Image (spheres, helix red, strand yellow):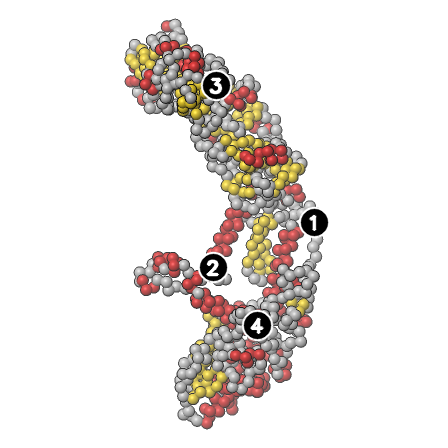
Amino acid sequence: MPRKSKFHCSVHEVGESSRSFRSRRLPAPMNCVPRATMSIYSYFDDGDCDYVCEHCGALFWFAERIVYGPLHARPQYTHCCKGVVVRLPFPLYPPAAMRSFFEDAAFMENIRAYNNMFSMTSFGARIDEAVNDGRGPYVFKVSGQVSHWIGSICPPPNEGPRFLQLYIYDTDNEVPNRLRFFGNSGHTPLSPDIVRVLGDTLKSCNEYVRLFRSAADMCDASAECNFSVILYNNVGDRRYEPPASGTLGGIVFGDDSNASNYDIIVHRKDGPPHRVSKLHPSYIPLQYPLLFPFAEPGWSPDMRLHSISGARMRNLTVNMYYSFHIQDRENTYSLLLNGGRLFQQYLVDAYTCIEQSRLDFVNANQNTFRSELVAGLYDALGRGDSNAHDIGKRVLLPSSFTGGPRYMYKHYQDALAICRVYGNPQYFITFTCNVKWPEISRHLVKIGGGSSQNRPDIIARVFRIKVQQFLRFMKSEKTFGDIVAASCFAIHKVYVSLFICVTCGTTTQMVSQRVRDIRERQKSGTIEIRVIKKWISKGKKEELCYQFVDAYGDCIEATTDVKEIEHFDSIIQLQSCYKVTGYICIAQRTYMATVNHPASLVIGHKAKFDRTTNDEIPTMYFNFATYDMIKQRVKNTQLLTDYIGRVEKSSLCPTRTGMMKREVEITLWPDMSHLIGDNVIPGHIVAITSAIVTEHNGLLQLESTYLTTLMINPDMPQTDEHVQRLKALPAMQPTVMNAPVVTILDLKKSSQQTIQASRNFTSEARIAHIHDNRGWYYVLCSKCSKKLYAEEDNGDVIFVCKDDDDIVPNFRYCVNATITDATGSADAVFFNESMEAILNISCEDMVTKHGQTTNPRNVPQLLKSIVNIPKELHLTQKNDGQIVVNNVTEVRATSDIQSPAKATGTSTFSPTTPITKPATSKRQLQETPGPNKKQKRT
């Protein structure tokens, strides 16, 4: 019979918080510094923009090179010509008069107004001028869609000429006409002399102006002639040479049916304005004649990349075209890069062209981006459409489209995932661009670009270099600790979120991650821990388990495969400190977890344990629960319980009566009970860990498990406060609950309220009959306590457990009988303790040594001999009316037996010393019992 010790601890609340005790934490110093020694960092200068692309001569900073190239090799750059595959003509040297205007501050302040005066297309967009009302730098801001429009050759009746019509209508008064319509659009009054010189310069060098001048001569020659001006779309080979006469367009008389899809047709009169396609090569030169005085054609879909070594020719994208043109080059002067505020408008226009090109690609490849579910019924359900013709008509922007709703939602989900794995960011850093950085100032002086606001491309390039340098510095220098994740977004002002392994503290703490911050599926870091427990799990899968605690008193479980026991058993020693790396983070198990932590560690062959010494790490971990918390954990095996209390009494027997309702009964099974022996006496303080909470007869019980540790009068800093408070409490007065003496008739007919108020009774009765149809014993496994099943093996009977081998059969009484007295009879169940008290013989000896025991339904003669012998039965009546006999004593004298009305208490009992099973009784029994029927254990 297995031995189990029980003692009772009075309830002394530890607190109301969910964690009643945490080991000592190391406080961070008030003047905490990120590193052990503070070092002062000076400004890191990235040098001058003096590195030249060997293919196109573009100027770059060294930090803009291709990073995967060899360190000793010449720096390579791809932001300009993509490594010689982009071949476009360099800008032509501008006319002398126009270059002199670009060096005049008054002209540059009104350059957008002068450009609109000579532009042949109108700029269709809502320009927000309110952004420039303050004292900040000039900003060109538009809202809505950007488009260019071109009208007819002659203005409508009763309207003045505008844009293109100014080149054709009333050329004798061209300068007054231009000033009349655009003279008030500048910040200061526009100069007629500058207007006259610009007009003469464009007449001499701009092929589009010459073409429209020819149309003006025809209008003057014949008022009835019907003609149109066509601007050709095909660029061909002339993109590598200055435009010649007749290559950009022509005048067509009569029908214009031979025009291609993208050719621009300008009618003589009465024609509506036409929107110029962004795919047309004249889209840019028609709008910006001052930046492109020679009418150099813009981007066209027919442009191709330069083929190298017979490779397939690919398209030259819009992004490549504009990236090539906005680069500074040695010994090259560009009106575009010196255009000031007009250059800003050009960049906005170029950006819209690039976005439109990307949107056109998405629209043309909808079948690739959209699945049938997203393209069809999903859209209809989301919009509530009822018309089947509308299904599948929407254009879906994939998550790869920068700035789209799915792109933003994907990054939002990524941010949430980072926070879920690594926790909240420890630092949120704003990195703002400084337009007065020395690199920017020196480069502007070198190229003569004037103010930094006129070269936003230079500011963006230097800012990108600084952001990448900042992130590299944070990772390499570890100013705030090891960075496990980082996210940054925006431009000109970057918001960087850093996820640091540890918070500020000592240098030792900063190189290690806190156990509390470990999450499921997190990448392995470095933790500094002490091993405080080690055991082998006996669940579905055998594992070698550990408890690790860090310097902050936080604890986490770790497991390794049982096959690795020999390897890790010699490496990982109890109460030793280690720095651990290479572990795997998984979710915490949901059965008999010893630590309330969302994650646990898996120690595999890649894990590394470096022994260290750290006296700051506690030697034990407690998570004491309060009495109210214990009541909520009854029969909940998800999390084991730690508890501390003062011993009020102890015994080797289960006490079924006479305990206060605020006591906790602790049950220790064989290994633990033999370990403590008789050391637990009333008044001792007991701290128990990893116990299961159960309940019996309304009393809470803590049952030990195979990983329970019990400390008597613990002497350590973690428990000093609790021990002192528990010792100061007054002794509890023993209270014995009444167990009235009743008759069987009272049990059967008494009110239900009385029975519920007092379930324990004493009655003088005798066994009238033993029911042999249900058997009188059963056999349990000595390891898992599950019922064993008999199997015949070569004439012998062996008892088999489905889960364990090498077991010892544990024979237990379970006798169903009818008890009777002078008032009536009732059925009752006699379990092992009560039958051993009557027979004074163990169940195993009854089965193996006394005859006629081959079948549990055959009742031995020795067992039948107790029938009709009066006994004093100590009973418990269950809620379902079942009567269980807890103990049996001899009948006392009549004067000692109180009537039911005068009963004041009940006797407790100590069972006989458990009879030791024979050591040779493993799984085999010489005698063959019959089949046993499964019994319900109470």
Closest to the observer, 506 or 395: 395
Name the spot of residue 57 as percent of width and height, x first.
65, 72
Q: Quadrant of the C terminus?
A: top left
Q: Please, what secondary structure does the residue beneath circle 2 have?
A: loop
Closest to the observer, 861 or 89: 861
The local crowd at label 4, few if under 14, some if 14 to 19, many if 20 or more residues have their Cα within 10 Å, is some
Please, what is the three-letter code of the amino acid marked with disc 2?
A: Ser
Name the spot of residue 308 as percent of width and height, x first.
58, 70
**Residue under the point 59% across and 77% down:** 89
Query: In this figure, which residue is indicated by the disc labeled 3?
Result: 921
Q: Which of marks 2 and 3 is nearer the N terminus?
A: 2
**Residue under the point 61% across and 26% down:** 715
Please, what is the three-letter code of the amino acid marked with disc 4?
A: His
Q: Which residue lies furthest to the front in this view?
A: 794
**Residue under the point 44% across and 79% down:** 260
The reply to whether callout 1 and callout 2 are in contact (CB within 8 Å) is no
Relative to residue 649, is residue 899 drawn left or right?
A: left
- In 3D space, how far apart are the residues under numbered discs 1 and 2 (Cα atoms)? 44 Å
